[in-house]
Amino acid sequence: LVDATQCDAVVADFRRGEWFATALSEPTSGNLFLSPQQSAERVEGGWRLSGAKRFVTASERARYLWVNASCDGVPRFFIIDKDDSVEIQQVWDTMGMRGTRSQLVRFSDTLLPDGRESQIQPPNAVAVGLAWISIGIAEAAMRFAVEYAQERVLPPDGVALADLQWVQFSVADMSMQLGASRAFAEHMTALTDRGDPSMVALQMEAKTVANEAAISIARAALEIAGGSGYFRGRPIELYLRNAMSGPLMALSGAAVRSFMGKVLLGRGPKRD
């Protein structure tokens, strides 16, 4: 933060376990969550924002919000208190990731204090965790598939599902997909820790690889479980619904591929 005293206070709260929520995505901004379209008005001591942010995970519990706004045409980021000018709207009724409670947050003339401005500078680690969400879902789906295949016995001959070659091939594919995703994510995380200039591109690439692996593994696990897996009593339907959320988180797979393709073909910025 700009103000060192306020920075120390916020960091101390973080270390004590206070909750923070990221309020960057706007209802009409698509993938441009780091380039806010909503403008804040300059006032004494900071800026005032009226608008809305969506997909704000843990907004109901959080004490602090990380918010961005266009300030005289320049994207600025602030860590603010969730005060009475902030309204949480209960809109989270989604196909998957229901436990995140990622509500819509409305701001009514909310102060964004100068001293709470966050000095975010590229490259940064803002998306470092996204790949790991999908990896966790993929791990759970594969674990279910393996356990189910080991326990299930097929009539009339009592053949174990795990003894069928197509099932063996399927879980082998899961393992390779998961291993590749995890290796990519570990590589990305290590370079992010070192502040490597390529970290942002790698974060998006690792996210895309993990997103697609999670969906593929969850679908394969459902195929192994068959009709039994289609019931809500089995966790695989939850894993599949949650996996589908990954590509919808910014940046989308299409946006990542567009950027990568331009760079690789000499039609975009050079990659370090």
Image (cartoon, rainbow, N blue to C red):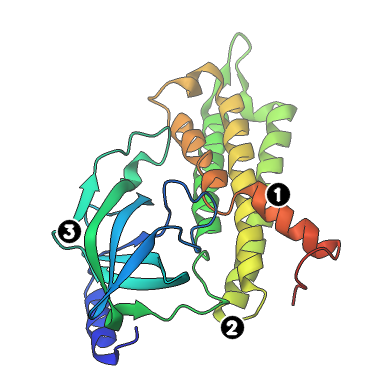
Q: Which residue is mark 1?
A: 176
State the CA–CA distance, disc 1 to disc 2: 27 Å
* Whether residue 141 is situated above or below residue 88 in the rendered picture: above
Q: Nearer the viewer, mark 1 or mark 2?
A: 2
Give the percent coordinates (x, y) of residue 13. 22, 76
Give the percent coordinates (x, y) of residue 201. 66, 66
Q: Which residue is mark 3?
A: 85
Q: Nearer the viewer, residue 37 or 17?
A: 37
Disc 1 is placed on an element classified as helix
Q: Relative to 204, is 17 on the left or the right?
A: left
Mark 3 or 1 closer to N-term? 3
Amino acid type for the residue under numbered disc 2: Arg
Q: Quadrant of the C terminus?
A: bottom right
Q: Quadrant of the N terminus?
A: bottom left
Q: Which residue is painted at 71% across and 59% down in the image?
A: 259
CA neighbours of label 1 inside 10 A, class few (<14), some (14 to 19), many (20+): few
Q: Nearer the viewer, mark 2 or mark 3?
A: 3
Q: Residue furthest bottom?
A: 4
Q: Which residue is painted at 56% across and 41% down in the image?
A: 142
State the CA–CA distance, disc 2 to disc 3: 39 Å
Amino acid type for the residue under numbered disc 3: Ser
Give the percent coordinates (x, y) of residue 263. 79, 64
Total tally of numbered discs in the picture:
3
Q: Which residue is mark 2?
A: 194
